[in-house]
Image (cartoon, rainbow, N blue to C red):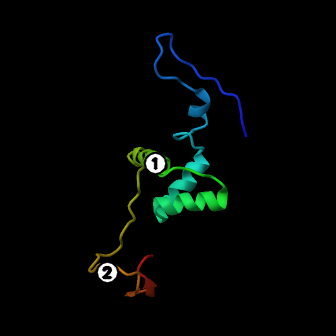
Amino acid sequence: MKIQRYVYQTSKGGKTYCPLEQNARIIRGATPKFAKQISHKYSNMNAPSVCEDLNENHHRKIAHSYLQDVSDWVGSIAQAKEEKWEYQTPQIDEAITSIVISLDGAYVLMREDGYVCGTR
């Protein structure tokens, strides 16, 4: 789909400004949905696999460098927003006496819940 868009520049030249890209939240030329899609894929696969998947399944051919650039921007946006997020810590009724860490996601015996997956 093609749409017309206006680009503005000062009389001194230099960087251009496109209101549509800012208002549409375009990230390095990618729509928010496409940026989310490639960032998610890139967090689960390597760059060549993501590029191959996008080409074969979505008919979108992109370069590794573009994938990395968009993913870096999405990550920087998340980091900037995380600074403003606040988390409410839960109230603990009794003292914690032990902590269990499972590196392989195996089932671990919990005191009241029985056996639960370590990745819970």
Work out which residue is located at the far top of the displayed protein and give it: 11
Q: 97 left or right of 27?
A: left
Q: Who is closer to the viewer here, 44 or 84?
A: 44
Disc 2 and disc 1 in contact, CB within 8 angstroms: no
Q: Residue, x 71% and y 33% (percent of image)?
A: 3
Give the quadrant of the C terminus.
bottom left
Q: Is residue 19 left or right of residue 96?
A: right
Is residue 53 found left or right of 4 in the rendered image? left
**Residue 81 screen position, x and y as percent:** 44, 45
Q: Look at 48% across and 65% down and name the residue there.
A: 44
- The amino acid on which the numbered mark 1 sits, given as a three-letter code, is Ser
Image height of 5 relative to 89, above or below: above
- The residue identified by callout 1 is 65
Indicate the secondary structure of the residue bearing disc 2.
Answer: loop
Q: Compared with residue 77, is residue 98 higher up or lower down, i.e. above or below?
A: below
Cα–Cα span, label 2 and label 1 = 40 Å
Q: Which residue is mark 2?
A: 100
Q: Nearer the viewer, mark 2 or mark 1?
A: 1
Q: Residues within 10 Å of mark 1 (few under 14, many from 20)?
A: few
Q: How many marks?
A: 2
Q: Is residue 70 in view from this perspective?
A: yes
